[in-house]
Image (cartoon, rainbow, N blue to C red):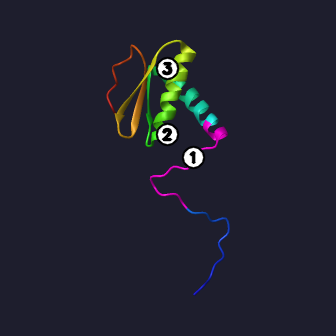
Amino acid sequence: MVTRDLFNVRPVPAEDAVAPLTEEEERRYVALLFKELGDTIAGHGWARCPAWTREDRRRLVEVARRLSDHWGREVCVAAEDESRLRLWLAGHEEAPARP
């Protein structure tokens, strides 16, 4: 039997647990979502985004609120299913056919 030393090993969180982001990581991730989703919504009037966890959904609602404030137009949010949210500009309620 071979014994190996393990360095820099840490316990892995349970599958349903999400490691929290630091304040800086959270700020940068929300800024990235703001830019990417904002560009998509500005171009198409809507965007879909995966939202697997409660934190993902919270972030997307926050991004929609910030986009609404930034544009002066309401950005709506709704769940399409248990793993995805749709954001759209008010007035663009019709969803395109799913691929």
Quadrant into which the N terminus falls = bottom right
Q: Position of residue 52 (x, y in %)?
A: 43, 43
Nearer the observer, 32 or 24: 24
- Residue 23 in the magenta stretch? The answer is yes
Mark 1 lies on residue: 20
Q: CA distance from mark 3 to mark 1?
A: 32 Å
Q: Main secondary structure of the magenta part?
A: loop
Q: What label sits on residue 55 in the rendered view?
A: 2
- Amino acid type at circle 1 is Pro
Q: Residue furthest bottom?
A: 1
Q: Residues within 10 Å of mark 3 (few under 14, many from 20)?
A: few
Quarter of the image for residue 35 reads: top right
Element type at mark 3:
helix
Which tag, 1 or 2, sits closer to the chain's start?
A: 1
Element type at mark 1:
loop
Mark 3 lies on residue: 43
Pointers 1 and 2 in contact (C-beta within 8 Å): yes
Q: Horizontal placement of 84 versus 68: left or right? A: left
Question: Marks 3 and 1: which is nearer the front?
Answer: 1
In the displayed structure, would residue 51 be above or below residue 94? below
Q: Position of residue 65 (x, y in %)?
A: 51, 22
Q: Position of residue 76 (x, y in %)?
A: 42, 21
Q: Residues within 10 Å of mark 2 (few under 14, many from 20)?
A: few
Magenta residues, start to end: 12-26
* Tally of numbered tags: 3
Which tag, 3 or 1, sits closer to the chain's start?
A: 1
Q: Residue, x 39% and y 13% (percent of image)?
A: 91
